[in-house]
Image: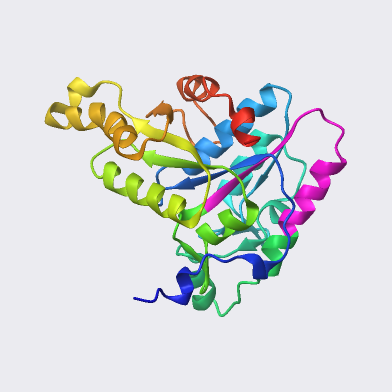
Amino acid sequence: MKSSARFDFDVQRYGEVPRLNGLMVVGTDTGVGKTLIAAAIARRLVAQGVRVEVFKPAATGCERVGGRFVPEDTAFLACNAESQLTLSEITPIMLKTPAAPNVSARHENKRIDLDEIFNAYRHIAKILEQDNADQRCVIVEGVGGLMCPISDDFLVIHLALALRLPVVIVAHAGLGTINHTLLTAHAARNAGLDVAGIVINKYITDTAALGDNGIVMETNPGEIHRFSSLPILAIVPAEESNNVSDSTIGEDTMHAISMVDWMTLAGR
């Protein structure tokens, strides 16, 4: 059976994109905490003296403040990366409707211009290339899941292929995550992406308090590793102080993230 053209993973038609040291953080679904993990990775690298920039191609559900869109996730990423870029340089596509970018654009009678996305990334690459820091890195956060459409014929997975960055999959810790994570890993590998590993997020450490659901929380990381053969890079606890709106990341979260050599992964 011939596959749909929308799942054609040939991205050569989008032109050359600079090859950078970096990571692309993708989620198994919306709401798994990929913004938190991407920001925590950026913060960890900055603390190690790495010059970090962040990139998020599109943001939906943006609020208007003073006549301009303010994407909360982008502001959080910029804060933790200590970026000097404007929010529009980090996220070139901003939309109000909280849906997939192509749906938001259609609803708002707008058009997703992929050139804006690639030109914004090239701009970030140029800034990093001109910096004299010993180590430089870009952290890219996807939109929704790996198969989320940015435009009607361009998915997050296409962007990952175009940027050629190692992929970090962020998964939630609870029931259903084995299926979601294995499907995401399979899609990524099938498309030819380099999957660096998996971060399990929102893990409840007091599994005894979960009753019968505790066994799910305890065994999911091992089962995901067993079936995917991918490393579980970090298990990040559910922590009240993790708050994108308040631009805070908890100490336990940062401890879990600090156990990983992100710069080595970014240079694969």
Q: Tell me the quadrant of the picture where the C terminus can be found.
A: top right
Q: Residue 31's x, y, as percent?
A: 40, 47
Q: Is residue 130 magenta?
A: yes
Image location (x, y in percent) of residue 3 = 40, 73
| Residue at (49, 76) in percent of width and height | 107
Residue drawn 73% across the image and 58% down it: 120
Rendered position, 99 above or below 187: below
Q: Is residue 75 visible?
A: yes
197 left or right of 48 in image? left
Residue 116 or residue 16, whichever sits in front: 16
Position of residue 90 measured from the top left corner of the image (x, y, whole percent): 69, 51
Residue 99, quarter of picture: bottom left
Q: Residue furthest bottom?
A: 109
Q: Is residue 79 magenta?
A: no
Question: Quick check: 46 above or below 180?
Answer: above
Q: Is residue 20 left or right of residue 64?
A: right
What are the residue bounds of the magenta stretch? 120-142
Q: Residue 260 location in percent, x, y?
A: 53, 24
